[in-house]
Image (spheres, rainbow, N blue to C red):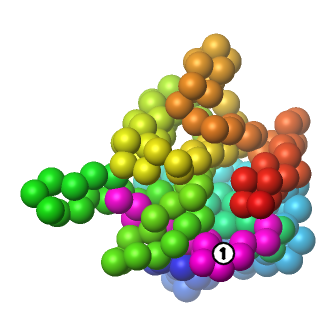
Amino acid sequence: MARMKKAINYINDLRLSKKGTRRALGNLLLLKYEKWMKTLALKDFLDFNDAIMENRNEIGAAQFFGKFRAYAFEEYVYRLLKEKVCINKPLELFWGEKCPIGSVDGEIYAIEFDISIGEKAEGFVEPAIVFDTKVELDSARLKTALASFTMLKHWSPKAKCVLIYVARELDETLLKLAKNWTEAIFQFSIENNETEAFIGYVTRRLC
């Protein structure tokens, strides 16, 4: 895994705090983290994710708890793929690795995708599928994801692009239009748990 900063790092930072309430929160989050890591149940992950949001004032700056939640969701999707989908060589599963999107004067330019499945070559992932994960999906985040997908497809036309989100904070019409630039969109929420459909989709794409 290439992702350097992970949810467990944020948890340990809280557990090592000089402030008692932050240490207690860190211990609580560790229990919730270990639970969803063991069960991979969406309800357990969302309970962990909600606990981060509910304690954002104790955790600190918006950027801090925002990245905490974002990296945790990346990890949930990564672990789900690792445990539930058979990925055969030469393909591998990657987290936070760069995929090339273009070349100028012989220099490769690459951008980082949350998760990817592909082959590692010359320091980059040549992807079969890339995944963009969003805890809250609003219009700005959607447009950023679609821009990344579009650039990738210009370089790797056969790559499949998948968007996964928890909460939708945009017009449904825009989300429907987004399907013109992505192969699949899945929601991971209590009200609309599409984790099984997601696993099935990826499995079929790799067959």
Instruction: Give the x, y percent position of residue 136.
Output: 61, 39
- Whether 89 is drawn above or below 140: the answer is below
In this view of the protein, which residue sits in the foreground, 39 or 116? 116
Instruction: Give the x, y percent position of residue 120.
Output: 46, 76
The mark total stands at 1
Q: Quadrant of residue 173?
A: top right
- Whether 39 is drawn above or below 41: the answer is below
Which quarter of the image is occupied by the C terminus? bottom right
Furthest toward the bottom, the residue is 16
Q: Residue at (22%, 55%) from the top-left corner?
A: 103
Magenta segment: 85-100
The answer, for residue 3, to whether it is visible in the render is no
Examine the structure image and report whether residue 143 is included in the region drawn in magenta: no
In this view of the protein, which residue sits in the foreground, 86 or 48? 86
Query: Which residue in the structure is indicated by mark 1?
Result: 26
Examine the structure image and report whether residue 99 is included in the region drawn in magenta: yes
Q: Residue at (55%, 67%) from the top-left corner?
A: 118
- Whether 196 is drawn above or below 1: the answer is above
Q: Residue at (37%, 42%) from the top-left corner?
A: 154
Which quarter of the image is occupied by the N terminus? bottom right
The answer, for residue 93, to whether it is visible in the render is yes
Q: Residues within 10 Å of mark 1 (few under 14, many from 20)?
A: many
